[in-house]
Image (tube, coloured by chain):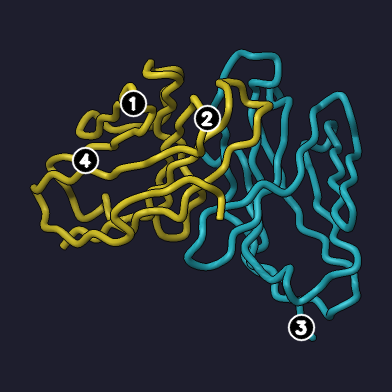
Amino acid sequence: DQQVKQNSPSLSVQEGRISILNCDYTNSMFDYFLWYKKYPAEGPTFLISISSIKDKNEDGRFTVFLNKSAKHLSLHIVPSQPGDSAVYFCAASDGYGGATNKLIFGTGTLLAVQP
Amino acid sequence: DSGVTQTPKHLITATGQRVTLRCSPRSGDLSVYWYQQSLDQGLQFLIQYYNGEERAKGNILERFSAQQFPDLHSELNLSSLELGDSALYFCASSGGGTIKETQYFGPGTRLLVL
């Protein structure tokens, strides 16, 4: 059973436009969410996180939105740049309060930013 | 460069064999995590060690085992290998043992079981 789902395997966006990557989860106990970016032949790199007490967190061009009632989060990249082309993984945990250290990852979305 | 190193980068072996994957965490990090990424799958958490002790366990098969040594490097042992064990294996490290701390990933070891 996939507790964290990224239903779009790929997304193509023009340079300068907004990229929106989506993630759905099923476990209502999740209280901490993260996005990782992965380039080919490299390990994932942490991008941004949000705890369940917030509904938005921003870091430069990257913003994560959390809709707890819909069990949905999204990552917005504005403006998109060709260097943003990578696989983006959504991850979740119910360990923000210290109960666990496990991260549950989605299957990833390949973002291609066209020049 | 995350500062986490994994060896070897690639490994080709046969079914039934045993292999050892090695991970050196970032300097000063006490926690090591192991993940498996199979084809078209997300990263599956296997196990976490913190300062030499097992801290959390995920979907790790009984044929797999891990340990963290006094110098904090970690090894993941995979035995009685099956075709389905072919995957990318990532190691990550963090300073402490809580989920709030960023996990820094190594480049991975690609295992192919023939």
Q: Is residue B20 left or right of residue B36?
A: left
Q: Is residue B5 left or right of residue A87?
A: left
Cβ–Cβ under 8 Å for marks 1 and 3: no
In yellow, which chain? B
* Residue furthest bottom as drawn: A115
Q: Distance between the residues labelled 2 and 1?
A: 12 Å
User: Relative to residue A87, is residue A29 depicted above or below?
Assistant: above
Residues tagged by mark 2 and mark 1 found on one chain of the structure? yes
User: Which residue is disc 4 drawn over?
Assistant: B78
The amino acid type found where label 4 is placed reads: Leu
Q: Which residue is drawn at 42% across and 48% down?
A: B5
Q: Is mark 2 on a helix, strand or loop?
A: loop
Residue B94 image point, x, y percent = 56, 32
Q: Residue at x 81, y 50 (%)?
A: A74
Question: Which chain does the residue under circle 1 lie in?
Answer: B
Q: How far apart are marks 3 and 4 (CA)?
A: 41 Å
User: Any mark on residue A114, and which?
Assistant: 3
Nearest the viewer among A53 and B49 is: B49
Dot 4: within a 10 Å radius of its alpha carbon, few (fewer than 14), some, or many (20 or more) residues? many
* Tag in front: 2 or 3: 2
Residue B83 image point, x, y percent = 21, 55
The amino acid type found where label 1 is placed reads: Gln
Question: Which chain does the residue under circle 2 lie in?
Answer: B
Q: Residue at x 26, y 50 (%)?
A: B85
Quarter of the figure with the C terminus of chain B:
bottom left
User: Relative to residue B14, is residue B90 depicted above or below?
Assistant: above
* Tag in front: 2 or 1: 2
Colour applied to chain A: cyan
Residue B45 image point, x, y percent = 46, 36
User: Any mark on residue B68, and which?
Assistant: 1
Nearest the viewer among B9 and B113 is: B9
